[in-house]
Structures are given as structure tokens and as C-alpha cells.
């Protein structure tokens, strides 16, 4: 699977967010935890949790991420990111005496999907969530749904935010509902060790969670 630079939806393994020194605030904790509480574990689940998250350092925490988003991202309701401001350019003409390739296709600006449906705040916030989740899942051996859920819980995302957690072969896929303050942000994840992908997607602004177009 092709790896792409850290500025896009899949983050390179060497990329690390700098340590955020912002203090944990009550509003930040409530922002993504208001929909429910994390389930506690007993018995055999405790051993699995120790295996999955026992030695991992959560740096930064979800509260710090939320506080950083509040201070550095656009305010709620900011306009969508939208397609590029300049129109797509036509392919260069073929040299004299040569026919242009028959499969030449004019690039088309997107009309749907995260680029045009997520507002600027969602887009900004997503970049921070994507990186910390991807990094937490990269080292997960045998990423079963139980282990992936534990990782997400340990990162601060409650069960009510986690949807369609399902294993297919050696990969566990999931969706994460990150809607807040009228936004439409969700993430689509594919936990597969070093081939892990975490991508933007679009959910309805209100009502039950239903994932829509993902970032391509």
C-alpha cells in the first residue's frame, strides 16, 4: 500500500506531533466524551488491555488535542475548504506532428466529499485526530476489533463515537464520529499494523451517524 506524506490523511511513521503543553480543561474533556462513558474491563480483558496499551505513552492527550484545536483551528461554522480556487488546467498540447493521447482526461474539481463538505474547522481538527490514532494503531499486533476498541477508548474516544467496527482478514475497519458544534467530521480507519490508514469522511450534521464520502 502506498505511503504518502504526513500532510495528507495517512501519516508517515516518523511524523510526531510536538508535545502540547496546554493544560487539560473541563470543556475539552467534555467535547468528545459527552455522548457516553468508556466501559470498564475486568478479568481477561484487563490482561488484553495491558498487552495493548499498558506500555504506550499517550502524548498528547485528547484533552490537549481539543484545547489545541480550540486555539489554532478556525471557529465553528467557518466556510468549507472547497475545491481549489483556480480552475483545473488543460493538458499541454501535443508537439507538432503528434496526436494527443487518446486517454487524456481533463482534471475535474471535486463536487462532493470532504474537500467541499467539511468546513475549515473540521478539516483542521481532523488532521490532529488522524495522526494520533494512526500512530497508536501502527504497533498493534493482530488488530482485532477488541484491541482496536481498547486503543480508541484509551485515546479518549468513547464507545458511542465508535461505529461499524469489523474485522476482515488481518485488518479491522472502523468509523469514528467526531461531529461537534454543527460539523460533519468523521474518520474512517483501517487498522493493519504499519499499513494502517486513517482518513477523513463526511457524516450528516444532525441525526444518527451514517458515514458518507471519504477522502480520496
Image (tube, rainbow, N blue to C red):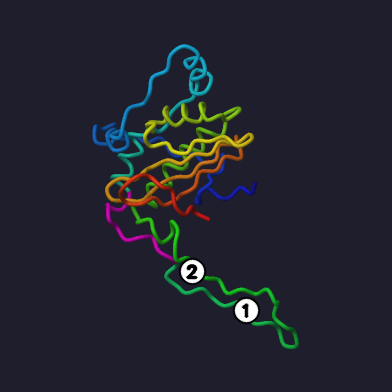
- Identify the residue at horizontal 38%, vertical 60% (top origin): 81
Residue 164, above or below 202 = above
The residue wearing badge 2 is 109
Residue 178, above or below 118: above
Which segment is the magenta one? 73-83
Q: Horizontal placement of 11 versus 34: left or right? A: right
Query: How many other residues sit within 10 Å of disc 1, few (<14), some (14-19) or many (≥20)?
Result: few
Q: Residue farthest to the front?
A: 208
The secondary element bearing badge 1 is classed as loop
User: Residue 92, which numbered label?
Assistant: 1
Image disc number at residue 118: none
> Quick one: SS at disc 2?
loop
Q: Looking at the image, which residue sits at the far left?
A: 26
Q: Quadrant of residue 152?
A: top left
Is residue 90 part of the magenta span, yes or no?
no
Mark 1 or 2: the one toward you: 2
Q: Earlier in the sequence, mark 1 or mark 2?
A: 1
* Percent x, y of residue 104: 65, 75
Amino acid at each position: 500500500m502506498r505511503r504518502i506524506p504526513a500532510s495528507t490523511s495517512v501519516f508517515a511513521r516518523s511524523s510526531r506531533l510536538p508535545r502540547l503543553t496546554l493544560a487539560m480543561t473541563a470543556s475539552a474533556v467534555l467535547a468528545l466524551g459527552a455522548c457516553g462513558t468508556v466501559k470498564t474491563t475486568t478479568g481477561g480483558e484487563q490482561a488484553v488491555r495491558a498487552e495493548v496499551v499498558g506500555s504506550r505513552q499517550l502524548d498528547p492527550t485528547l484533552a490537549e488535542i481539543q484545547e489545541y484545536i480550540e486555539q489554532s483551528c478556525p471557529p465553528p461554522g467557518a466556510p468549507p475548504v472547497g475545491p481549489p480556487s483556480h480552475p483545473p488546467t488543460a493538458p499541454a498540447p501535443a508537439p507538432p506532428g503528434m496526436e494527443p493521447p487518446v486517454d487524456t482526461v481533463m482534471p475535474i474539481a471535486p463536487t462532493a466529499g470532504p474537500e467541499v463538505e467539511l468546513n475549515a474547522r473540521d478539516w483542521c481538527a481532523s488532521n490532529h485526530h488522524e495522526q494520533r490514532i494512526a500512530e497508536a494503531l501502527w504497533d498493534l499486533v493482530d488488530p482485532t476489533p477488541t484491541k482496536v476498541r481498547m486503543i480508541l477508548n484509551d485515546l479518549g474516544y468513547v464507545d458511542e463515537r465508535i461505529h461499524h467496527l469489523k474485522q476482515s482478514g488481518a485488518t479491522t475497519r472502523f468509523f469514528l464520529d467526531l461531529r461537534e458544534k454543527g460539523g460533519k467530521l468523521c474518520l474512517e480507519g483501517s487498522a493493519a499494523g504499519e499499513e494502517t490508514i486513517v482518513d477523513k469522511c463526511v457524516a450528516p450534521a444532525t441525526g444518527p451517524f451514517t458515514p458518507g464520502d471519504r477522502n480520496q
